[in-house]
């Protein structure tokens, strides 16, 4: 059979109208992802913007909220950074849990839930990621978070170079890494949008003299550095003690020293260019892996996937994996528990700079009751408005 | 059956829909790919997911812009007379020295790929420049195209810039350091083989003087030299090289314009050199020639997105990893080029990273080098076959399958050499230390 169509002005007009219609429908869905997710901070948090630390971000789409709570007793300062990679939900959901539950008894707690805000506005082409993940809150209402892209949005940063050269080290990486916040440190105040964002975070670390800083991530189960803590040499001793405590609590955790020849990453440059003790943590997220099967919201939430189950049987994964998958509750519980253990260990190692945070749920509580049990109702007003 | 159902069924249904569209209904490849993506999504219960179809296309937006603008550039440098003038100069100077000529031509073809990591850039710039030289010196057009296509693939693999290695390295946090010599080991022997198989026999035959042929060649050379070869005639290439190298050598100082704008600026500089040319006509011709390939890329983008959405991609990748260990190398040599039918960079990401993780006991730099060499072959696999299609275009060959036929044996050698580099990774690494 051979359909030999001859085009004319009418068919051309019809095709253009069809293309326009497709653009409008898809464009509306795309534009709907630009709105920031609402978070509802616990009492005591004050909202600032990253541009308060680096004016070059003021009014820029890369500017992002920073929440601060100061305890009644003096101590050190801790930063929790979520959303470096918006396709790694346990990072930003864990940060949101601290923001909505923490009561600081000593020192100061800084929380940036959506570090690369622009990356939440789009998903990566050909990854077929879900647009949103949803959680049922205790009163029956629903909280949603966007599932974004590892990279900065192309609306903010395009085109990208074919080769990304990390400025301070000269290291060469594939061009798409130029949009990756965790390859941009220590940043550049005059650089690309993501380099300016990285610089803003460095300015916060320096200006607030942050004692201990967490960068929360997820990795695919076939990646060697997964269910792991990566620590700069300055934080290695603290990380070793925390890792032993976590293993003692029945939470498997690897400890990896930050490679000295891999540049642009938080665990390397935060330590080299500020006085903070950097810690990067990775949980296992099948919905971002290369081996995953059907890609949808259910996979992002449950981490259950038959392709990963088969890969586990073949010995291709670096984490234990069974038919229960890697539920988001478990991944968030790992991050929250590990941060709590670090804070306790910090108070033992460096008493004057200790930070004490109360009211955070334990590992078993999050796994049993779910993340939604610790998120606030969406209609609740905090500091006047949802933030 | 549990493993096959339903993702294996979706995969077969999508392939069947594609084959039906292309062979039974004679639809353009792009439309057939789009149709098979729509059918795959519908079968998997996603209905007509417009968002996914549009998003999938955007996976190739940069490639599409590069191809369209590189085609305009090629058209511009042809129109000002540069191609003919350079070809005539090379023929006069080197036609009695076939081996240095063939090596020089191969290096010229590879150069843009070595600097940009793109095989398309090779075919459409220096590939187009040397094509008339080889054909005038007696290399048949189909073999000339195969020579250019293979040179382009080796150019994208050769150092200093190799994007598949960077993609694989990014997947395991391996810095792009220490790859120059391994990538030369991977590319130089096969480049010599390609010269020996496709070019040398014809160039040697032609170097023996024949008075009648000589007279004919002289007439042709005189026509090609209508525009004198001056330094100014090279302006578009100089502008292109300055823009490309400036970005890499002076990061932060030199603006990062992106390859499409670099090609357009270099094309604009052609107004200042050689014959006068009509920009609108050249751009229209170039985009008209490129449209079928651009359409294929859009169709492939939708196809990949739906493969990922429905779980077909994971099914394919884990099935490749499930092959018994003694067959692992066969799997590497076949599945990576086969996935390259969709995209060679995609193959490096989707299959290259799992394969390097399956080979952790071997030197990672050499393994990544071997995998990158094999993933380059993806640019010769239809329906995308970017290197094959554009090499056919610059040599005037109508059917690019005729070009791919001549690429078969050298491609097999490239795949075997890639596997050898992986198998010998540890001893080679010890030698290089």
Image (cartoon, rainbow, N blue to C red):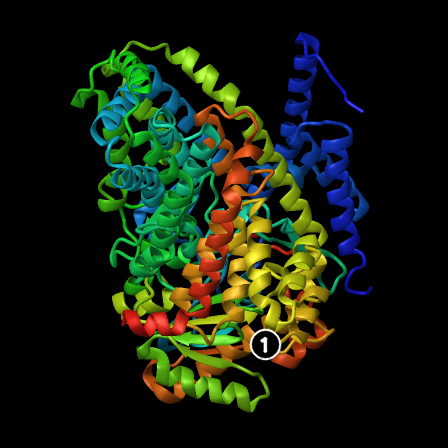
Q: Residue B207's spot in the image, x, y percent?
A: 29, 31
Residue that carries the numbered disc 1 in the rendered image: A319
Given residues B79 and A80, the one toward you in this image is B79
Q: Residue A242's spot in the image, x, y percent?
A: 46, 85
Q: Quadrant of residue B373?
A: bottom left
Picture layout, residue B186 above or below residue B261: below
Secondary element type, mark 1 = loop
The structure residue drawn at horizontal position 56% and vertical position 60%, both measured from the top left corner, is B332
Which part of the image, by quadrant, shows the N terminus of chain A?
Answer: top right
- Chain letter of disc 1 in the image: A
Q: How many numbered discs, if any?
A: 1
Q: Quadrant of residue A46?
A: bottom left
Q: Residue B195's spot in the image, x, y percent?
A: 37, 43
Q: Residues within 10 Å of mark 1 (few under 14, many from 20)?
A: many
In-image side of A48 versus A35 (left or right): left
The structure residue drawn at horizontal position 64% and vertical position 23%, both measured from the top left corner, is A20
Picture layout, residue B82 above or below residue B420: above
Q: Residue furthest bottom?
A: A248
The structure residue drawn at horizontal position 74% and vertical position 50%, both measured from the top left corner, is B11
In-image side of B82 versus A311 (left or right): left
Given residues A256 and B347, the one toward you in this image is B347
Q: Residue B31's spot in the image, x, y percent?
A: 68, 30
Residue A158 showing in the rendered view = no
The structure residue drawn at horizontal position 37% and vertical position 13%, both measured from the top left corner, is B279
Residue A261 showing in the rendered view = yes
Given residues B59 and A299, the one toward you in this image is B59
Picture layout, residue A292 above or below residue B339: below
In-image side of A386 versus B5 (left or right): left
């Amino acid at each position: 059979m051979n359909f030999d169509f001859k085009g004319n002005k009418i068919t051309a007009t019809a095709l253009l109208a069809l293309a326009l219609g497709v653009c409008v429908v898809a464009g509306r869905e795309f534009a709907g992802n630009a709105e920031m997710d609402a978070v509802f901070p616990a009492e005591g948090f004050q909202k600032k913007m990253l541009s308060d630390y680096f004016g070059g971000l003021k009014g820029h789409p890369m500017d992002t909220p920073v929440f601060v709570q100061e305890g009644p007793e003096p101590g050190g300062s801790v930063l929790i950074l979520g959303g470096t990679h918006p396709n790694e939900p346990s990072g930003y959901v864990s940060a949101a849990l601290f923001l909505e539950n923490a009561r600081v008894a000593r020192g100061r707690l800084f929380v940036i839930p959506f570090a690369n805000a622009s990356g939440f506005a789009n998903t990566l082409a050909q990854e077929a990621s879900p647009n949103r993940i949803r959680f049922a809150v205790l009163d029956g209402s629903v909280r949603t978070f966007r599932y974004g892209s590892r990279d900065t949005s192309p609306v903010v940063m395009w085109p990208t170079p074919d080769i990304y050269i990390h400025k301070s080290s000269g290291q060469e990486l594939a061009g798409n890494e130029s949009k990756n916040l965790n390859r941009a440190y220590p940043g550049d105040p005059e650089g690309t949008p993501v380099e300016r964002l990285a610089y803003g975070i460095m300015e916060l670390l320096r200006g607030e003299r942050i004692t201990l800083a967490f960068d929360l991530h997820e990795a695919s189960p076939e990646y060697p550095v997964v269910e792991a803590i990566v620590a700069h040499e300055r934080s290695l001793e603290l990380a070793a003690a925390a890792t032993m405590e976590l293993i003692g609590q029945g939470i498997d955790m690897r400890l990896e020293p930050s490679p000295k020849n891999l540049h642009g990453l938080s665990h390397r440059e935060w330590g080299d260019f500020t006085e903070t003790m950097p810690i990067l943590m990775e949980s296992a997220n099948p919905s971002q892996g290369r081996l995953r099967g059907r890609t949808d919201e259910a996979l992002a939430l449950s981490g259950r996937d038959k392709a990963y189950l088969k890969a586990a049987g073949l010995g291709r994964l670096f984490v234990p994996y069974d038919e229960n998958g890697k539920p988001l509750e478990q991944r968030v519980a790992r991050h929250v528990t590990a941060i709590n253990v670090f804070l306790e260990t910090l108070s033992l190692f460096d008493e004057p700079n200790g930070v004490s945070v109360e009211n955070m749920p334990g590992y078993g509580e999050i796994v049993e009751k779910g993340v939604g049990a610790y998120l606030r109702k969406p209609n609740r007003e905090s500091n006047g408005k949802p933030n | 059956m549990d493993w096959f159902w339903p993702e294996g069924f979706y995969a077969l249904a999508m392939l069947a829909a594609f084959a039906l569209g292309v062979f039974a209904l004679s639809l353009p490849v792009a439309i057939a790919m789009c149709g098979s993506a729509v059918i795959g999504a519908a079968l998997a219960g996603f209905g007509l997911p417009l968002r996914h179809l549009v998003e999938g296309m955007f996976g190739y937006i940069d490639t599409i812009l590069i191809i369209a603008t590189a085609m305009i550039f090629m058209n511009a440098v042809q129109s000002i007379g540069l191609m003919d003038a350079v070809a005539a100069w090379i023929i006069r100077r080197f036609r009695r020295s076939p081996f240095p000529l063939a090596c020089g031509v191969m290096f010229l073809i590879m150069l843009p790929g070595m600097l940009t990591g793109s095989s398309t850039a090779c075919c459409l710039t220096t590939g187009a420049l040397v094509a008339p030289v080889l054909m005038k010196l007696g290399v048949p057009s189909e073999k000339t195209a195969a020579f250019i296509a293979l040179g382009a693939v080796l150019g994208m693999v050769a150092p200093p810039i190799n994007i598949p290695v960077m993609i694989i390295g990014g997947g395991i946090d391996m810095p792009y350091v220490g790859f120059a010599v391994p990538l030369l080991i991977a590319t130089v022997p096969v480049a010599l083989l390609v010269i020996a198989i496709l070019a040398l026999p014809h160039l040697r035959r032609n170097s023996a003087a024949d008075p009648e042929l000589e007279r004919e060649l002289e007439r042709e050379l005189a026509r090609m030299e209508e525009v004198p070869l001056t330094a100014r005639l090279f302006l578009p290439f100089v502008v292109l090289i300055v823009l490309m190298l400036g970005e890499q050598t002076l990061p932060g100082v030199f603006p990062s314009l992106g390859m499409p704008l670099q090609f357009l600026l270099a094309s604009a500089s052609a107004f200042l050199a050689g014959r006068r040319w009509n920009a609108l006509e050249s751009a229209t011709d170039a985009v008209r020639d490129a449209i079928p390939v651009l359409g294929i890329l859009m169709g492939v983008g939708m196809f990949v997105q739906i493969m990922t959405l429905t779980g077909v991609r994971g099914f394919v990748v884990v099935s490749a990893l499930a092959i018994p260990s003694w067959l692992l190398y066969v799997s590497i040599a076949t599945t990576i080029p086969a996935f390259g039918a969709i995209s060679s960079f995609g193959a490096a990401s989707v299959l290259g990273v799992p394969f390097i993780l399956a080979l952790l006991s071997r030197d990672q730099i050499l393994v990544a080098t071997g995998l990158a060499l094999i993933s380059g072959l993806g640019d010769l696999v239809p329906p995308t076959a970017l290197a094959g299609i554009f090499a056919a275009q610059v040599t005037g060959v109508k059917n690019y399958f005729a070009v791919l036929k001549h690429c078969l044996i050298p491609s097999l050698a490239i795949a075997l050499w890639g596997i050898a580099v992986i198998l010998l990774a540890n001893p080679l690494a010890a030698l290089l230390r």
